Amino acid sequence: MLAKEMFKKLGYKRTKNNKNEVEYIHKIIYDGAKYIFFNKQNKWVETFEYITLDELQAINKQVEELG
């Protein structure tokens, strides 16, 4: 399964996918939006204050796909 499929299964929508960035957003009624942001150029990941194990697996898969 591809990372984008894993994120979709978790309720995330990919909002950016360009040369330097990939971003997924999950809309949550109570807290606004959760996001996971990948910077391809500088090779870092930014996220909200906590992640689930399923989200961690999707993040690891995305990192693997990005190389």
Image: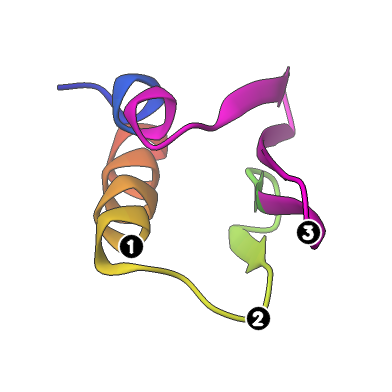
| Residue assigned mark 3 | 30
Q: Is residue 56 left or right of residue 49?
A: left
Kindly indicate whether the residue at mark 2 contacts the one at mark 1 (C-beta within 8 angstroms). no
What percent of the width, then of the height, locates residue 36?
62, 51
- Within the image, what quadrant is residue 64 found in? top left
Per the model, the C-alpha gap separating discs 1 and 3 is 22 Å
Q: State which region is magenta.
A: 7-35
Q: In front of the other: label 3 or label 2?
A: 3
Residue 20, magenta (yes or no): yes
Type of amino acid at the residue the image marks with label 3:
Tyr
The foreground one among 29 and 14 is 29
Per the model, the C-alpha gap separating discs 1 and 2 is 13 Å
Question: Is 43 drawn above or below residue 9 in the view shown?
Answer: below
Q: Secondary structure at mark 3?
A: loop
Tag 1: Cα neighbours inside 10 Å, few (<14), some, or many (≥20)? few
Q: Is residue 4 left or right of residue 26?
A: left
- Tell me what residue is drawn at x 38 percent, y 37 percent: 10
Q: Is residue 49 left or right of residue 29?
A: left
Label disc, if present, on residue 56 of the rendered structure = 1
| Residue assigned mark 2 | 49
Report the number of numbered marks: 3
